[in-house]
Amino acid sequence: MTLTAQQISDAIGAALEGDSGLEVNGINSPEKAGAHDLIYVDADKHLGRAQGSAALCVVVSEAASLTGKTMLRSTQPKLAFAKAAARLAGPRTIATGIHPSAVVSPLADISPTAGIGPFAVIGENVHIGDSAQIGAHTVVEAACWIGDGCRIHPQVTLYAGTRLGNRVEIHSGAVIGADGFGYVHGEGRYWKFPQAGVVEIGDDVEIGANTTIDRGSLDDTRIAEGVKLDNLVHIGHNCQIGSHTVIAALSGVSGSCSFGKNVVIGGQAGFGEQCHLEDGAVIGGQSGVLGGKTIRTGQVVWGTPARSLDKFKQQHAWQQRLPELAARIQELERKVDNK
Amino acid sequence: MTLTAQQISDAIGAALEGDSGLEVNGINSPEKAGAHDLIYVDADKHLGRAQGSAALCVVVSEAASLTGKTMLRSTQPKLAFAKAAARLAGPRTIATGIHPSAVVSPLADISPTAGIGPFAVIGENVHIGDSAQIGAHTVVEAACWIGDGCRIHPQVTLYAGTRLGNRVEIHSGAVIGADGFGYVHGEGRYWKFPQAGVVEIGDDVEIGANTTIDRGSLDDTRIAEGVKLDNLVHIGHNCQIGSHTVIAALSGVSGSCSFGKNVVIGGQAGFGEQCHLEDGAVIGGQSGVLGGKTIRTGQVVWGTPARSLDKFKQQHAWQQRLPELAARIQELERKVDNK
Amino acid sequence: MTLTAQQISDAIGAALEGDSGLEVNGINSPEKAGAHDLIYVDADKHLGRAQGSAALCVVVSEAASLTGKTMLRSTQPKLAFAKAAARLAGPRTIATGIHPSAVVSPLADISPTAGIGPFAVIGENVHIGDSAQIGAHTVVEAACWIGDGCRIHPQVTLYAGTRLGNRVEIHSGAVIGADGFGYVHGEGRYWKFPQAGVVEIGDDVEIGANTTIDRGSLDDTRIAEGVKLDNLVHIGHNCQIGSHTVIAALSGVSGSCSFGKNVVIGGQAGFGEQCHLEDGAVIGGQSGVLGGKTIRTGQVVWGTPARSLDKFKQQHAWQQRLPELAARIQELERKVDNK
């Protein structure tokens, strides 16, 4: 889409300096940008990259100085750029209309503005909301609810009864609602414990490629609004993930964990059953939180078992001094024993 | 399905106390249950939840006391409940009949009682047993054997020659039989080592969503009966996994490992090549067992490199005391040097 | 394919000893081999297995001694065997011709020698090169480039604009080009940062099952020639992976990392944003390299945070001696205080 600098400025609440009528029709990095691409710079050390760019319009901080550019000044240039990008280069279309090869149950309730790609399978009593898009090969089992504006990429599987809010985006290969890993051991084997709950996902959640979220066993698994899950994340049955929490790739959350709002979790972190993370907890990459533990609001933890970052750093420093401590012990022994 | 309390009692070997004719038609948690749902309680602290539930029929321990409920007493209430649940709320149907959109080789041998979903692809010389169900979009390459009663959810891939026993359940996105990660380095590049074996999976195995099990290179990869694999698990080529072993999510097993029976493995554990776990070994979450190592029967290990849980705890405790030890060394130095 | 011992010998540059006309038509392990299978042995301790095998033709080292066998002598028997195997038992066919059920855009440019399996979806302006094979259910979105001889197994997803070199092999469930995990936090929520770059993959790359490689945000993600990625690996947006680098299963690489050539990475290793690995760096399994760190050429690192293997071993040894050090401190205190 083509917008003028003035239109972008108005849309993102930036202060315009320069040519208000300048036409902008894309976004890019400073090096790859053409004259009509929008770029941004949020650190003084990158100002030279912006100055040297072919781009004529730059989102900058309030104090930045560039010559010959139309500047959109913002207190948060990266955020302002992200908002502008959503208008200039909105998301790619996944599907428009209902592809004739799709298998759609006559008992499904599909908005006339929804799109469904080739070979998609839509089960009985599924609801698909306005402007929702379902990619090629995606399977939506019976009784799923897909809210307005959802974007489901190709090859996603939604098991029966999964409920998505509005504007949920799910990347390829994600599996939502598979049976949880619940068994009872007895008589020398494992007996399947019922996995009869569902998965409920709130508005504006984004789920990465090949991520898995298991259905609840007797209760439900819930992902609150605004949560962002990276690729290859595992969320176990009955978990409750609070709003605007982010979880990086390859992290694994065992069953019945409850996470608060605005939690931040690094990659490959692991959580035993029934962990509780309070609002705003921060978990370092590869950390392991033992089952049943609580991490308090504002705590930053690292390592396995997870401890406060300060403690982790201190212990790590002492560990590296172990050879020195041992040498000092030896020296003391020499002195004491020689007396 | 609707059963009487007496019928359930008989089926699961529980002692009935109360209304033998009471009709039960589902399972649930105490809080969500209606009058005709079955619930269970296996710890005294949860008795209040059961007493307060609308459910009229409860599986309880031998000593538990509830009023106004029909009780099914068992020494293992959770196990008894799981068995009852399998009868009251059996697994959801994946597919019935052969969907006209499926591409089925005329050379496949398919039981008339098997079900095959939309867009499934069944290759040459595939065998699909009685009552087996193949989900939408699942690809079964040539010469696979799928035993009776298997449940293959949508979007699974079985590479050529994969063999499943009876009652195997495989969740969406799992890939069985892809080439193992085997190369020979020479002349400045990696040459593919042949991956010509297959994957054999025993009876009653369950495989989680997006889990991968690689085919053997010259020998075969084998998963014995009753094994349960969680989501996003990786099993390398030529591994031998013993019966009734369970492996939690995101664990990775390198090539040519051999695991005994009844092994228990936590999430995100890792195993180098040619590890050997004896029967009943227990591996903590995020532990790392180095290639070629053996973990003995009954051992419980943690950490990387994996050591006995007792040793891990002891070392962890000492680690936390390092600042104190250092202070004591300093104090000794002061005393000795001041003399 | 059937070849004579002489033909194999010529093809792999081995020295033939025995029956040059012996016909060989497959490869196998010594135990499973028939008379006309080729086997190999690269360690003296396995010579007995080769001697006892039914196979008549064996790839061996220059000094090995076997009786009654036709021997193909090589300085690198395993490499020579791998090269022979590629000729005797080349890769299985994935697809020949264009299956009538495939949905192929009339604007796609497809070589007449390419194969496309059932239900594959090929978008606008896609190029598919000579002899490339696209498996059943694979989705190739618009403007992808697939070079000559590529082998894409079933159920792969290539997001729009993905570019593959020649002879790239991608296993089932892999997702190439999904949006990177990039957000800007502001006003109490996360805003999606544009993910507008693509993924470029070089010649002779192999990508494991269910692996994910994210598209670049403003720049592109690049995997250089000869890279081998195992199953369930995650590569974040904007990463640059150098040629002939290998990454084992379940490893996770955060955004904007740059890896040199011939890097070797064990399973479940993790990398923070903007790590830099120089050519030939070696990263142990489960190691964690913190964001922004550099690992030098030839360094072998272990642990989290990653340190040199020597240091790791030393620290690990000292850790195990902590109880002893504490006892020695106590003994010193006794002696010093009793004076």
Image (spheres, coloured by chain):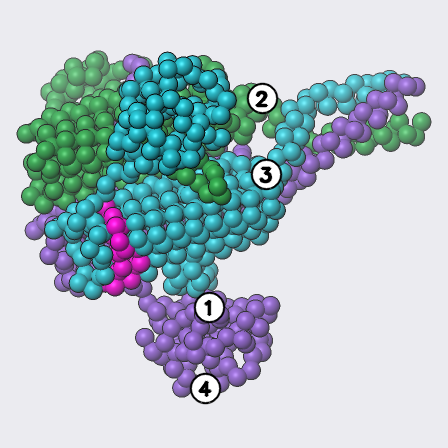
Chain colours: A cyan, B purple, C green
Q: Which residue is mark 3?
A: A300
Q: Residue at x 50, y 79 (%)?
A: B71
Q: Nearer the viewer, mark 1 or mark 3?
A: 3
Q: Nearer the viewer, mark 4 or mark 1?
A: 1
Residue A127 percent location from the top left of the image? 27, 59
Residue A144 part of the magenta segment: yes
- Secondary structure beneath dot 2 equals helix
**Quadrant of image for the N terminus of chain B:** bottom left
Q: Relative to residue B188, is residue C336 depicted above or below?
A: below
CB atoms at circles 2 and 4 under 8 Å apart? no
Q: Which residue is mark 4?
A: B19
- Secondary structure beneath dot 3 equals strand
- Between residues A29 and A172, which one lies in front from this camera angle? A29
Q: Chain of mark 1?
A: B
Residue C290 part of the magenta segment: no
Q: Which residue type carries mark 1?
A: Ser
Q: Chain of mark 2?
A: C
Q: Chain of mark 3?
A: A
Give the quarter of the image for residue B308: top right
Q: Which residue is mark 1?
A: B29
Write down the region rendered in magenta: A124-146
Taking A232 as reference, is A277 left or right? right
**Quadrant of image for the C terminus of chain B:** top right
Q: Which residue type carries mark 3?
A: Val
Q: Which residue is mark 2?
A: C311
Q: Which residue type carries mark 4?
A: Asp
Q: Which residue type carries mark 2?
A: Lys
